[in-house]
Amino acid sequence: MKKGTKKRIKEPLELNDREMWDLLIDLLDSPYWSAVKRMITLRTMAAESGLKSVDPFKEPTLMARYQGVLIGLNELEMLTLEEKEDRKKKVEAETTKVE
């Protein structure tokens, strides 16, 4: 993108929830999402491999860590898709009320 064509992105802590969700939903519809999905897939495979190789009795902390990684990786996509769907339903409900 040419310099100056992007709108200014705020620092993460300056974003309100609405702005955060707007950007995440935009990301879903962008070509950059392919890279995010690939990273999620690669890290998921690594975490699942780790889970399968860890003895839960000898290394419960490591097992919990792998489980946390899996949850975190899947939550980004799941929550963003949920928010997108919720917004779609809200628009449809408002459109139905107007008609």
Image (cartoon, rainbow, N blue to C red):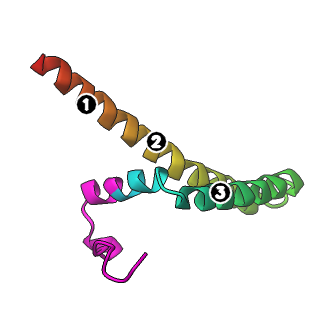
Taking the view exactly as shown, the residue that stands out farthest to the bottom is: 3
Is 10 positioned to the left or the right of 99 in the image?
right
User: At 80% from the left edge and 61% from the top edge, which residue is drawn?
Assistant: 59
Quickly name the residue at label 3. 40
SS at circle 2: helix
Of residues 45 and 1, the one nearer the viewer is: 1
Taking the view exactly as shown, the residue that stands out farthest to the left is: 98
> Whole-percent x and y of residue 69?
64, 58
Q: Quadrant of the N terminus?
A: bottom left
Looking at the rendered structure, the kind of residue marked 3 is Ile
Determine crowd level at label 1: few under 14, some 14-19, many 20+ residues with C-alpha closer than 10 A.
few
Looking at the rendered structure, the kind of residue marked 2 is Leu
> For the magenta stretch, what is the residue range?
1-22
Quadrant of residue 13 within the rendered picture: bottom left
Residues at marks 3 and 1 touching, judged by CB atoms closer than 8 Å:
no
Looking at the rendered structure, the kind of residue marked 1 is Lys
Is 76 positioned to the left or the right of 23 in the image?
right
Residues at marks 2 and 3 touching, judged by CB atoms closer than 8 Å:
no
> Whole-percent x and y of residue 88?
32, 33
| Marking on residue 90 | 1
Quadrant of residue 99 within the rendered picture: top left
Query: Which sits earlier in the primary sequence, circle 2 or circle 3?
Result: 3
Query: Which sits earlier in the primary sequence, circle 3 or circle 1?
Result: 3
User: At 87% from the left edge and 55% from the top edge, which residue is drawn?
Assistant: 55
**Up-down: is 30 above or below 90?**
below
